[in-house]
Image (cartoon, rainbow, N blue to C red):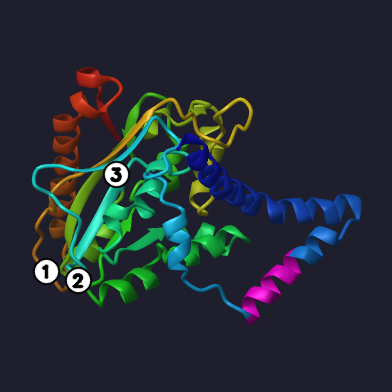
Amino acid sequence: MYFLGFIRMWLFYTTWIVGIAAIPYATVAAVFYYNLIPVYILLFYYSFRYIFPAQRWDWYKELMRLNIYPYCNKQNIIFVDGAEPPKSYSNIMLAMAPHGILTIGYTCLVSSIEMEKTDIKWLVTDFLKILPFIRDIMVWVDIHACNKNQMKDIMKTGCNVSLLPGGFQEATMFKQNHHRMYIKDRKGFLSYALKYGYNVQPGYIFGEEQTYWQLDAKYGATFRYWLNQYQLPGTIFSGQWWCPYMPFNNIDLNVVIGKPIELKQIDQPTSADIDDAHNKYINAMKSLFDRCKEQYSAQGKSAVLEIY
């Protein structure tokens, strides 16, 4: 089971890393070494995808059941407090934390059998939707860009959505064995929830904080957070010694999901309305964390959720 989980995880994250490196590599090869072959490969790829756009492939999601074929010691999707997977088109926004470095827990959730019948549109940064190769996987598993237009189009239909509000800022401040959320300045997703009548379901990923080692955010902080403004990661991390972009696997990864926070639909939510919903979400996340940390956190009772 571990071998199958490793192969699936390795293929996915290798495609991700290759996609990130492809454009810079082609640029350097062309400018400094006068080698245009990588450029031609990228031109062929984008031309091919322009003529033959990628389509959703349900069989691929079946193949990538990362919590059924674990890479870590445990990879569990757990509903607590009477919560359950949202019913199809039930106006649920699943807001998860933490982002982590490479969203290991969120990736396992996307491919999980528990969420198969929820018809959730999984939202990720636009950055991944433009990179070569990894963008194909995003389409195959029905992942969408987390931008205003996409969110409005999806949420008008009442389709369930899921996102990681902390984004790259949460990744940049990642520190191994620390539970951190970047949420104080993240309120936009709640304005959409209010406008389109969505209840917000909180979820926390215990074990995400153990997946990588990262250079402390205080080193190069100004530049790293500046990158985040342009939807670029400011992470400097390492995982397994034999393959640094692969996460440490001697951990328990527990994705814990609580009951939805009920919010009233408000066509034109005010700042006060959004602040009220924001406070409810933060309190729900704190409560979920505190109730579950003893059972699911590697640090047990001593675990502390740091809110930024």
Across and down, in percent, residue 185 comes to 30, 47
Q: Nearer the viewer, residue 271 or 79?
A: 79
Query: Circle 1 is placed at which residue position?
Result: 265
Disc 2, SS: loop
Is tag 3's residue or tag 2's residue first in the polypeptide sequence?
Answer: 3
Residue type of the residue flagged with mark 3: Ile
Query: Circle 3 is placed at which residue position?
Result: 183
The disc label shown at residue 196, or none: 2
Residue in view at x 13 percent, y 48 percent: 280
Disc 1 + disc 2, Cβ < 8 Å = yes
Residue in view at x 33 percent, y 50 percent: 165
Across and down, in percent, residue 169 comes to 42, 43
Image position of 145 (left or right of 219) = left
Report crowding for label 2: few under 14, some 14 to 19, many 20 or more residues within 10 A (C-alpha). Answer: many
The residues bearing labels 1 and 3 have C-alpha atoms spaced at a distance of 22 Å
- Magenta stretch in the rendered image: 42-51
Residue found at the far top of this picture: 302
Report crowding for label 3: few under 14, some 14 to 19, many 20 or more residues within 10 A (C-alpha). Answer: some
Looking at the image, residue 299 lies above or below residue 24: above
Residue 112 can be seen in this image: yes
Residue type of the residue flagged with mark 2: Tyr
Across and down, in percent, residue 298 comes to 30, 23
Image position of 101 (left or right of 151) = right
